[in-house]
Image (cartoon, grey):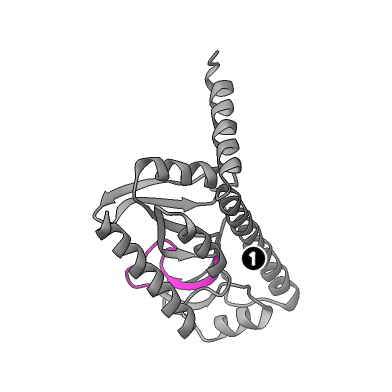
């Protein structure tokens, strides 16, 4: 047990260090802080949601790919056009993704509780990935995503429309981020946590017709 809490303490120190040097996503700290308030939970390698432009043959490829633009708060027309003008090696892909959290828990019960909380606020693509010395690793993902192959030239109207759509998708992800934070805060209240479990049990009864 003591070793697990050492991992948690080191993870928190890393977050504070990243925040101080500006490496941490600018709008994720408050949500991470709520995770750490839970006794049996800590996070690692999480993202608040972002827009990137990636130079790659295919958008899912990591080998021989390069991120040429990245912002967690949005993109504007100048960002888009200036990145395109710089040229490319393969293809340029505009990619928007919602928040992703990697959460370690000390117990199975806590892992399932985190999943319940997250799924109820839209993190449907979530699950337990593995178990190791740090605990049970839970990945929380929303379905918020956009992938668009960029052309070599855009007029102002086309660029504005594309940027507007990308920012709207990003904001959908930020709404999920806010809802997750609020739900986690509510769960710290024992009465709210009990209500969450009761709601989940009622949904299971309805789904499987348990009487």
Q: How many labels, in total?
A: 1
Closer to us: 158 or 118: 118
Q: Residue shown at 52%/71% (left/top)?
A: 52
Residue 128, image quadrant: top left
Return the residue at label 1. 166
The segment highlighted magenta reads 49-65
Q: Is 21 rendered above or below residue 100? A: below
Residue 10, image quadrant: bottom left
In the figure, is residue 145 to the left or right of 67? Answer: right
Q: Quadrant of the C terminus?
A: top right
Does the image show residue 101? yes
Q: Position of residue 61 (x, y in %)?
A: 37, 64
In the figure, is residue 63 to the left or right of 116? Answer: left
Closer to us: 18 or 165: 18
> Does residue 61 show up magenta in the picture?
yes
Q: Position of residue 207 (x, y in %)?
A: 56, 23
Q: Position of residue 164 (x, y in %)?
A: 71, 68
Q: Residue shown at 60%/36% (left/top)?
A: 195
> Does residue 103 show up magenta in the picture?
no
In the figure, is residue 199 to the left or right of 129? Answer: right
Q: Residue shown at 49%/65% (left/top)?
A: 47
Closer to us: 7 or 165: 7
Q: Is 85 rendered above or below residue 200? A: below
Near mark 1 (Cα within 10 A), the count class, few <14, some 14-19 or many ≥20, is many
Q: Residue shown at 56%/75% (left/top)?
A: 26
Q: Position of residue 199 (x, y in %)?
A: 60, 32
């Amino acid at each position: 047990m003591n070793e697990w809490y050492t991992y948690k303490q080191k993870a928190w120190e890393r977050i504070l260090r990243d925040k101080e040097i500006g490496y941490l996503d600018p709008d994720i700290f408050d949500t991470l802080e709520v995770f750490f308030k839970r006794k049996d939970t800590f996070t690692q390698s999480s993202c608040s949601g972002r827009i990137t432009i990636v130079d790659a043959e295919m958008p899912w490829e990591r080998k021989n790919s390069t991120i040429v633009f990245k912002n967690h708060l949005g993109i504007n027309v100048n960002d888009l056009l200036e990145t395109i003008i710089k040229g490319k090696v393969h293809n340029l892909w505009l990619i928007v993704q919602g928040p992703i959290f990697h959460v370690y828990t000390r117990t199975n019960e806590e892992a399932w509780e985190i999943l319940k909380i997250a799924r109820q606020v839209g993190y449907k693509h979530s699950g337990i990935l593995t178990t190791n010395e740090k605990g049970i690793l839970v990945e929380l993902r929303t379905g918020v995503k956009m992938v668009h192959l960029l052309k070599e030239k855009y007029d102002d109207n086309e660029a504005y429309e594309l940027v507007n759509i990308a920012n709207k998708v990003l904001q959908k992800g930020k709404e999920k981020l806010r809802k997750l934070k609020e739900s986690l805060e509510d769960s710290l209240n024992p009465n709210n946590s009990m209500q969450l479990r009761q709601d989940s049990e009622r949904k299971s009864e309805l789904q499987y017709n348990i009487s």
